[in-house]
Image (cartoon, rainbow, N blue to C red):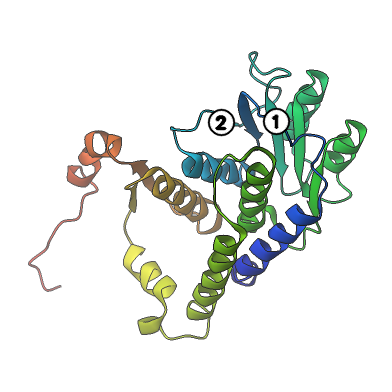
Amino acid sequence: MLRALATGGAQVRRAVTAATETDTSRVAGAFRPRAVVVAGIGVSGVAGDVLCAIVGSTSSVLVTVHRDAGLPGWVGAADAVVGVSASGSSEETLSAVGEGIRRDAAVIGIGATDSPLAELCAIGRAPFLGWDPELSSRSSLWFLAASLLAVTRDCWGLHQVPDSDLMVAADRLDGVANQCRPGSEVFVNPAKSAALDLSGCVPVLVGTSPLAGVAAYRFASQLAVNAKWPSTWGVLPEAGRTMVGVLEGPFAARESHDIF
């Protein structure tokens, strides 16, 4: 898993290349959707959360993440559906993309090449951003999120994050991977330091903005899936009202004066 996570920078660069090489003219141009529905589950849904956080609530285009089979009843020909699946075989995503094609929505697929999702997009004449999944689905967030950002920017102008910013993010991911490499000492490795700090406690992860909230949720998910470790997460200001009890409850930290 550590080796897979170290490819984050390479995933971003690959995503930018895939978005550049994919012909999206059929769904781009003068067409500006009423809403963009990102259909994905698991890490693919988190990629949609990243897009929602970056676009924000001020956009004239509604951006929402759908984590279930089919589509909401209001989705139609005036909307766009982006099916995201790292494996290209998630049943929920396939169902949503198939329904989007049936309703004549603008459809784009992102996921593994030579997968059921790629075949479905080919049948529906929908653009598809593919990659060869050398990694597990849970470690492919950076490719999925960067692809989603690039294609929604180029097709519909949902945000103004340029490729240069994505490349800066890729360089920083490379730097973090080097800093957190398994062979580095604890005092210079923030990942090892965090692991020691979290040992023996239930982490409370709070985001101070919508994007930080996505990071908190992703952190909690990774703790559960990879480390089998429980945690709780939230986003301010709501978390300030609902999670304060966790800090004062029976699992709250207690200072002990017993030297043993």
**Count of labels in the image:** 2
Q: Which residue is mark 2?
A: 64
Q: Earlier in the sequence, mark 1 or mark 2?
A: 2
Q: Quadrant of the rendered structure where residue 37 is?
A: top right
* Position of residue 226 measured from the top left corner of the image (x, y, whole percent): 55, 58
Residue plotted at (60% across, 71% down): 6
Neighbour tally class for label 2: few under 14, some 14-19, many 20 plus, Cα within 10 Å:
some
Residue plotted at (46% across, 46% down): 214
As helix, strand or loop, the secondary structure at mark 2 comes to strand
Q: Amino acid at mark 2?
A: Thr
Left or right: where 83 falls relative to 239: right
Q: Which residue is mark 1?
A: 81
Neighbour tally class for label 1: few under 14, some 14-19, many 20 plus, Cα within 10 Å:
many
* Observer able to see residue 1: no
Left or right: where 241 falls relative to 205: left
As helix, strand or loop, the secondary structure at mark 1 comes to strand
